[in-house]
Image (cartoon, grey):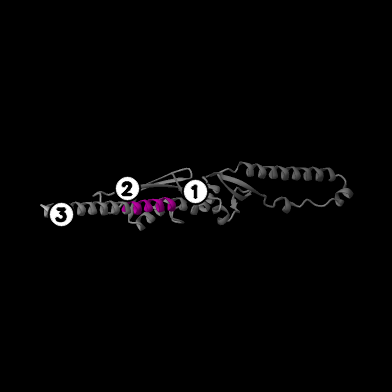
């Protein structure tokens, strides 16, 4: 009788120990999977920051961002998920927020492929650049030059009848009046500020450096 009781007790303890180990293992597995989701979301948000300069340059010059320059958010997120024994099943972007879902590559102690979710933010939303203000400034410069040319033409016509007075007037510098006009200004691309130079032929130079643009973002996990 005593032997049976002892045997039953040992069996119960063994079962209890096995259950605790399985629970602990399952917990560790889920922790690693959550870490994979977190790193995947952060990588996706970081990719948006890495793309900021080519994205802004493409927008300023009326082009679409071409692939291949830097990894896309989805590519970066998938790579980091894979490094943590998971694969990316979904990625969505909304404003400055990147949300991901990852799935384990192997069945866990639960007997199933488990999933975990995470979200990260870039801190600021990168959007379409607003060129209205700088365009208005350039137009003002163009109008000012046109007025100067018109005034110079008017003065030349008035002086044409008086040779002595006309000779005293400096010639109109056509080359100077044909110099390219440019305007430099700060503009907003969504919530990100950049400095640009607008030319009178419509081309635009991005003056802000990559580091000046990157430091405006704050990549971190969010709920």
Tell me the crowding category of disc 2: few under 14, some 14 to 19, or many 20 or more residues within 10 angstroms, Cα based. Answer: some
Q: Which residues are magenta?
A: 29-43
Query: Does dot 1 land on a helix, a strand or a loop?
Result: loop
- Measure the alpha-carbon separation of dots 2 and 1: 24 Å
> Which mark is drawn over residue 6?
3
* Mark 1, residue position: 122
Q: Residue 189: which quarter of the image?
A: top right
Q: Position of residue 101 (x, y in %)?
A: 36, 47
Q: Nearer the viewer, residue 28 or 167?
A: 28
* Left or right relative to 142: residue 23: left
Q: Nearer the viewer, residue 11 or 38?
A: 11
Residue 18 painted magenta: no
Query: Does dot 3 land on a helix, a strand or a loop?
Result: helix
Q: Position of residue 28 (x, y in %)?
A: 32, 54
Q: Position of residue 70 (x, y in %)?
A: 46, 56
User: Which residue is painted at 35% across and 57% down in the image?
Assistant: 84
Q: Residue furthest left?
A: 1
* Mark 2, residue position: 115
Callout 2 touching callout 1 (CB < 8 Å): no
Q: Residue furthest right?
A: 164
User: Which residue is painted at 58% across and 45% down in the image?
Assistant: 188
- Measure the alpha-carbon separation of dots 3 and 2: 42 Å
């Amino acid at each position: 009788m005593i032997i049976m009781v002892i045997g039953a007790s040992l069996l119960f303890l063994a079962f209890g120990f096995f259950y605790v180990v399985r629970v602990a293992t399952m917990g560790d597995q889920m922790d690693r999977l959550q870490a994979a989701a977190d790193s995947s979301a952060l990588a996706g948000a970081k990719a948006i920051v890495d793309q900021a300069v080519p994205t802004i340059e493409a927008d300023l010059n009326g082009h679409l961002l071409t692939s291949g320059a830097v990894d896309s958010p989805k590519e970066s997120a998938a790579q980091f998920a894979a490094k943590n024994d998971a694969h990316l099943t979904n990625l969505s972007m909304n404003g400055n927020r990147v949300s991901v879902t990852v799935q384990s590559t192997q069945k866990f102690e639960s007997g199933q492929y488990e999933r975990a979710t995470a979200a990260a933010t870039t801190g600021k939303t990168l959007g379409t650049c607003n060129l209205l203000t700088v365009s208005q400034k350039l137009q003002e410069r163009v109008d000012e030059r046109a007025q100067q040319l018109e005034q110079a033409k008017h003065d030349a016509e008035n002086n044409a009848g008086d040779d002595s007075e006309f000779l005293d007037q400096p010639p109109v510098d056509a080359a100077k009046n044909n110099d390219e006009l440019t305007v430099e200004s700060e503009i907003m691309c969504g919530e990100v500020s950049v400095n640009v130079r607008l030319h009178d032929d419509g081309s635009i130079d991005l003056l802000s450096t990559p580091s000046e643009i990157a430091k405006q973002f704050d990549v971190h996990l969010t709920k």
